[in-house]
Image: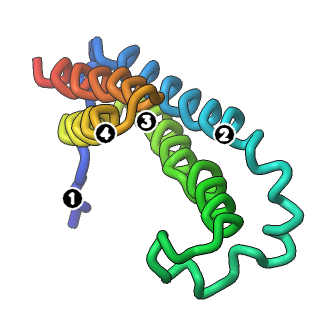
């Protein structure tokens, strides 16, 4: 009995490999840049975090009733360690892994990433969200190039 393959292998002359590789590198770069730039705000808060300042049920209170120190700590946490930067880096490395094995990603990954980046950019500007459109387009193009 043979195992079912849940992914598509690219044709021998797959032109989307370079696009997928650059999508992966772009996502890894965006994630690292996000952590480094916004991580500068975390440095003065690290001592409090290590003493358990974020371990409190006060997080569940409405934002308007939370202490300003807690709001600052929450914002710093959710813009660094608790942000999507970590998963974006992992996703970028997954794309690089797929490219090395000529595994074609489904186009919906690019479309989903692009929709999320576009909506977030419309809600908050200036921001880095428009950068998410770069790997999104590259993923869609890489997936489409494997169909031909």
Nearer to us: label 1 or label 4: 4
In what quadrant of the picture does the C terminus appear?
Answer: top left
Dot 4 lies on which element?
helix
Q: What residue sits right under mark 2 in the picture?
A: 38
Mark before the other along the chain sequence, 2 or 3: 2
**Residue 90 vertical position relative to residue 125 in the rendered view, above or below:** below
Q: Locate residue 115: give its quadrant.
A: top left
Q: Nearer the viewer, residue 6 or 86?
A: 86
Mark before the other along the chain sequence, 2 or 4: 2
- Residue 123, labelled with which disc? 4
Nearer to us: label 1 or label 3: 3
Task: Give the residue displayed 23% in from the left and 42% down from the top.
Answer: 112
Nearer to us: label 3 or label 4: 4
Q: CA distance from mark 2 to mark 4?
A: 19 Å
Q: Locate residue 78: give its quadrant.
A: bottom right
Mark before the other along the chain sequence, 2 or 1: 1
Left or right of 120? Residue 50 is right
Q: Nearer the viewer, residue 69 or 41?
A: 69
Task: Give the residue displayed 49% in from the left and 31% down from the top.
Answer: 27
Nearer to us: label 2 or label 4: 4
**Residue 55 vertical position relative to residue 95 in the rendered view, above or below:** below
Mark 2 vs 1: CB contact within 8 A: no
Q: Is residue 81 visible?
A: yes
- Residue 4, labelled with which disc? 1
Q: What residue sits right under mark 3 in the picture?
A: 95
């Amino acid at each position: 009995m043979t195992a079912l393959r849940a992914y598509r292998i690219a044709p021998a002359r797959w032109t989307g490999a370079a696009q997928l590789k650059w999508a992966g590198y772009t996502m890894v770069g965006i994630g690292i840049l996000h952590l480094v730039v916004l991580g500068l705000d975390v440095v003065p808060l690290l001592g409090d975090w290590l003493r358990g300042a974020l371990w409190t049920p006060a997080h569940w209170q409405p934002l308007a009733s939370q202490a300003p120190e807690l709001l600052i700590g929450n914002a710093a946490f959710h813009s660094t360690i608790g942000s999507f930067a970590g998963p974006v880096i992992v996703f970028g490395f997954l794309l690089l892994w797929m490219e090395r094995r000529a595994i074609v990603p489904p186009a919906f990954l690019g479309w989903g990433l692009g929709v999320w980046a576009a909506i977030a950019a419309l809600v908050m500007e200036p921001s880095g969200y428009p950068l998410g459109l770069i790997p999104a387009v590259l993923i869609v193009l890489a997936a489409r190039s494997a169909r031909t």
